[in-house]
């Protein structure tokens, strides 16, 4: 089973289209080409650490770039820290601008999100109430069908190898919370392996590889090697995370799992993930 697009596959797909066009001596319009591209590829747009309103200008500029490029969007994934210091109202401009992307393909584009450390524990219901158009995942999974392909998404804040000093002081039983959360993530990933495409979305980093650029002494406080440590049979096809603002390596592959750090301060743009379906 092919998982993810490769340069070779993309080349042969385009070549095949060219041959068909020549055979029938037809020229597709721009709109027809856009529709074709929408149908053969799954287009995921993902970002985290907008910290609205702090990085809103960069976020807005990135959205404009995607719109000018006629970027197709099937699925939008927000990997936490969407707002700054639990300022729930500051998510409104983020959702408003994202909605401008949701008119490019034939299908509607669902928005899936996880909470970050800036969306405070205990306020999850407030985000769900104020932004019901967003599918919030909090140590949960969902299955979305796009053009006949079932996509299973596990969403969580994620795990830290070592809780921060603030967490130890302010979150009771934080060590047990992470132990139980890791167990839950494993259980959910096992379910997701039954579907065509499995995606793990966490706010905290799911590997140390995409922490390159951050100070080594703080790596344990930025994430946990979920992808390295879990059984290979449970690994998702794609792992998306944020939190690492200073990362200089925002993409990695571990065995067959493609890992994306979509932290806006690190990437300086919104991340686009194209998957062959």
Image (cartoon, rainbow, N blue to C red):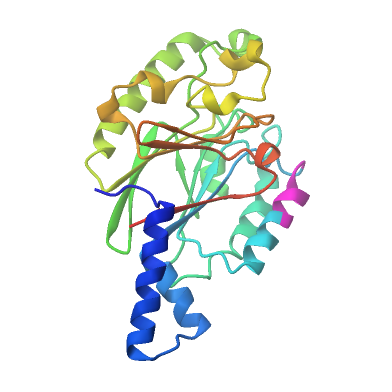
Q: What residue is at 28 percent from the left and 29 percent from the top?
A: 234
Residue 252: image x %, image y %? 49, 34
Q: What residue is at 56 percent from the left and 12 percent from the top?
A: 163
**Residue 192 part of the magenta-drawn span:** no
Q: Nearer the viewer, residue 17 or 214?
A: 17
In this rendering, is residue 119 above or below 3? above
Q: What residue is at 47 percent from the left and 70 percent from the top?
A: 105
Q: Which of 28 and 53 is in front in this view?
A: 28
Is residue 107 at least partly visible in the picture? no
- Return the residue found at the far bottom: 25
Residue 57: image x %, image y %? 78, 51
Q: Which of 271 and 170 is in front in this view?
A: 271
Quadrant in which residue 155 is drawn: top left
Is residue 19 at least partly visible in the picture? yes
In this rendering, is residue 172 above or below 242? above
Q: Quadrant of the C terminus?
A: bottom left
Q: Could you tell whether 101 is left or right of 156 in the image?
A: right
In this rendering, is residue 166 above or below 75? above
Q: What residue is at 34 percent from the left and 80 percent from the top?
A: 20
Q: Nearer the viewer, residue 65 or 128?
A: 65
Residue 229: image x %, image y %? 37, 18
Total marks shown come to 0
Quadrant in which residue 210 is drawn: top right
**Which residues are the magenta region?**
54-61
Q: Could you tell whether 175 is left or right of 16 in the image?
A: right
Main secondary-structure element of the magenta-colored stretch: helix
**Residue 60 part of the magenta-drawn span:** yes
């Amino acid at each position: 089973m092919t998982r993810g697009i490769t340069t070779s596959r993309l080349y042969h797909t385009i070549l095949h289209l060219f041959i068909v066009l020549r055979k029938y001596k037809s020229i597709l319009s721009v709109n027809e080409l856009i529709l074709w591209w929408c149908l053969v590829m799954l287009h995921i747009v993902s970002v985290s650490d907008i910290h609205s309103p702090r990085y809103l200008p960069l976020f807005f500029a990135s959205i404009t770039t995607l719109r000018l490029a006629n970027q197709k969007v099937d699925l939008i994934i927000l990997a936490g820290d969407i707002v700054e210091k639990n300022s729930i109202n500051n998510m409104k401009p983020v959702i408003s601008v994202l909605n401008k992307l949701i008119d490019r393909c034939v299908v509607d584009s669902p928005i899936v999100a996880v909470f970050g450390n800036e969306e405070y524990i205990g306020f999850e219901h407030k985000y769900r109430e104020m932004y019901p158009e967003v599918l919030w995942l909090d140590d949960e999974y969902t299955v979305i069908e796009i053009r006949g392909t079932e996509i299973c998404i596990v969403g969580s804040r994620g795990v830290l190898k070592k809780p921060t000093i603030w967490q130890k002081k302010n979150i009771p039983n934080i060590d047990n919370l992470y132990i139980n959360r890791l167990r839950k993530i494993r259980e959910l990933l096992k379910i997701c392996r039954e579907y065509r495409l499995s995606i793990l979305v966490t706010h905290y980093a799911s590997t140390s590889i995409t922490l390159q650029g951050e100070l080594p002494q703080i790596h344990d406080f930025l994430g946990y090697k979920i992808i390295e440590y879990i059984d290979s049979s449970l690994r998702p096809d794609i792992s998306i995370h944020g939190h690492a603002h200073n990362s200089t390596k925002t993409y990695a592959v571990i065995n067959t799992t493609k890992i994306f750090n979509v932290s806006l301060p690190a990437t300086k743009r919104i991340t686009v993930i194209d998957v062959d379906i």
